[in-house]
Image: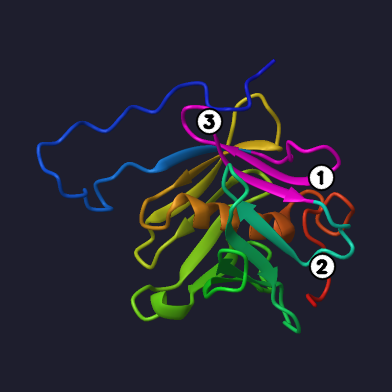
Amino acid sequence: MAKVHPNAVAPEPAATTTTSRAPEEERPPALLTVWRKSLLFNCDGFTVFDAKGNLAFRVDCYASARRRAEVVLMDVAGKPLLTVRRKRLSVTEHWVIYDGDGTARPLLSVRRHVSLRSSSKTLAHVTPLGSAAASAAEYVVEGSYGRRACAVRDARGDAVAEVRRKESVGDDVFRLVADPRLGAPLAMGLVIALDEMFGAGHGSARSLLRRTWSV
């Protein structure tokens, strides 16, 4: 049976003689394996492993899919890292990613791309919010989430996060590559939003989030 977690350990960065932190451009991206399943019985969610096969993040959804309007990304201990919440009264599908349990500041806005051209490769637009809005440009998500082949790109066209298919394990297990400029938690928050917009169970009981108004 194929392993869910990565098959190889990512190489450790070379030791340096300086005590200062390396710039984000020089730090390697985080390689994660995402399993579209909660480890808890009778729960929807995600289980995320790091490059060494250790548990990195959890998403465990207890509430009924019909009543659920947000999802919380947690660390291994269950501490809320991000809250992905549907924006109510929006013309298009619109999700907001908040820091922590959702009572703190908003970080990113994720809006589904609307186009009359079926050939458009753009999936969504990601806009920084709060204090980061003044210094960061909008991101665009391109590719196919359903095929597990999409990327979040900055204004220069560089990928800051990528969803890649993992060999021989099906669509429910895939790789997530997160550039340090975005960070692994926010990259996973975007995956949660994309899963609702473009996941295989969209519009059905399998969907992680339902297309309902948030309370």
Instruction: Please provide percent x and percent y for residue 47.
Output: 65, 40
Q: Residue at x 73, y 48 (%)?
A: 60
Q: In whole angstroms, how far apart are the C-alphas of marks 2 and 3? A: 33 Å
Q: Residues within 10 Å of mark 1 (few under 14, many from 20)?
A: some
The residue tagged 1 is: 43
The residue tagged 3 is: 54
Image-quadrant location for residue 13: top left
Amino acid type, label 1: Cys
Q: How is the image coloured?
A: rainbow
Q: In whole angstroms, how far apart are the C-alphas of marks 3 and 1? A: 21 Å
Extent of the magenta region:
35-61
- 32 vs 129: above or below: above
Amino acid type, label 2: Arg
Q: Residue at x 81, y 53 (%)?
A: 207
The residue tagged 2 is: 211
Instruction: Please provide percent x and percent y for residue 110.
Output: 59, 69
Tell which residue pokes out farthest to the top in this image.
1
Toward the viewer: 16 or 190? 16
Q: Earlier in the sequence, mark 2 or mark 3?
A: 3
Tell which residue pokes out farthest to the left in this image.
17
